[in-house]
Amino acid sequence: MKKNRIISMLLSLSLLAAAGNASSTKEKDAPIKGLPAYAQDKPLILPAVVEKKLPNGLTLWLIERPGLPLISMYLAVRGGSASDPENLRGVSDILSSTISAGTRKRTSRQIAEELQALGADISVGIGKDISYIGIDGLSSGTGQLLEILADTARHASFPEDEVKLAIENELQSIIASKSQPSYDLSQVFYTELFGKHPYAFVNPDPKVVARVTPKDLLAVYQQRFRPDQGILVMVGNLPTGKMAGLAEKHFGDWKSSGKKLAAIPPAPATTRQQFLVVDRPKSVQSTIYVGRPMPAAGNPDEFSLKVANTIFGGAFGSRLTQNIREEKGYTYSPHASVSDWAKGGIFSISASVRNEVTAATLTEIFYELDRLATTLPEDEELTRAQRYLKGSFLLSNETSSALASTLTGYWIDGKTPGDLAKYVPGIEKVRKQDVREMGRKYFASRKQAVAISGDAKAIMESLSLFGDIRLAKP
């Protein structure tokens, strides 16, 4: 109880100091005099989106974009790292490196050479809920590119030598990553937030990675890559009728095989406040993670949360950056983010600071969290955050490749192409009261878990101010 009173006193003093500096902050943040008012932002205008479904269950989203002679195509399926078998956690990392490493009729070199001849490249990615293969290239070669995409998505062969190389590369990557404080810290942090849920998994066990076989990869691949749980998104300089015809030609006879993917349960929505330390002896700085589980993608608070987080710590001019970087000089690049997935999400704050200011930094983070929950943002703060989010969204979806990628993510989250046009108006509708409500609902310091990687001997005493501090191991 005494420690809690001390924390409350520190936060109260910080609030009083902020109030005393309110006028100077307003002057600093005020727009330059004489500039014209901001113009009204335009929503993302999409050409007509043709939505179809093949008899085998494969969904098609097709968009014609006349102009540049380019085409982007993404074949995505449900199932990512959260769907890894329990005895093969981390197999997705090897899968993503080997899907395009050879098919029944093409070697990895042949795939690369054919794509190069068509002015194209291929990418493979696996998230928590999604696996995808993407190809970007010249629209004049759409038929050939789609045939390569179909061959890769349907007939990957996982050659033994390619699998062995991928495993060796992954093991070396793990060794290199372990030298970073974020490696063990991330696993401790995610485990605290998500417990035994698959979203808690972050770092693959080298012993598990080393025993992955081509047979294992083929089984996971066949379980995920099925037309009845997939989508083909095509955006580019080609009539949608031709796109549909080519999709039917190359994917129409695709049949599902293998055991169907099990559904992922909803992730935890809350956490208890805990203070965890991952001991890193002789480290001269501490890496701080603060956060909590959040709602899944498409939740009613989506736009308000984006604005609230941008004001708090999601942009360079945010409150958190101004406080612990510009004013205090505690850290170089603090950051906060809200990420949402199909079955849950996460709010996280990260900052790396000197040992001697670890506790002071945490105090300021808590202060900014609680300030968001108890006060209304200034008009200019809100406007800046909204313009930043709207502008970033519009810029990030200018190219066909980016738009295809965004639509793929929308599909896995249960959204529709029409939701793209809702983003800008949704951000514009957020009001100051909505930001404060998000602060109360999600950002309050008492609702956050804390994990810190650092020299326990150097930081534990100062951190004891916050209550019980527990040493944790990944």
Image: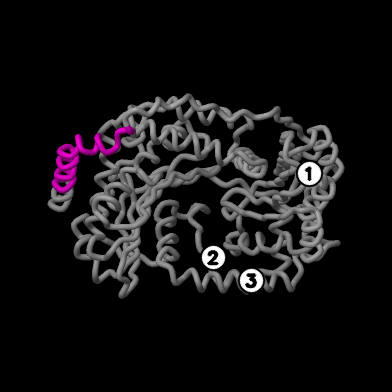
> Colour scheme of this structure image?
one colour
Cα distance in 3D space between marks 1 and 2? 39 Å
- Which of the two discs, 1 and 2, labels the residue nearer the N terminus? 1
Q: Using the image, tell me which numbered label, if any, was put on residue 167.
A: 3
Badge 3 marks a residue whose secondary structure is: helix
Q: Name the residue under label 1.
A: 139
The residue type indicated by label 3 comes to: Ile
Residue 85 screen position, x and y as percent:
61, 59
Q: Which residue is drawn at 30% across and 75% down?
A: 282
Between the residue at mark 3 and the residue at mark 1, the CA separation in whole angstroms equals: 35 Å
Callout 3 environment at 10 Å: few (<14), some (14 to 19), or many (20+)? many
Q: Which mark is residue 130?
A: none
Q: How crowded is mark 2: few (under 14 residues within 10 Å), some or many (20 or more)?
A: some
Q: Which comes before the other along the chain, label 3 or label 1?
A: 1
Q: Quadrant of residue 34?
A: top left
206 is higher (above) or lower (below) than 193: below
Name the foreground residue: 428 vs 413: 428
From which residue to which does the magenta span run? 9-32
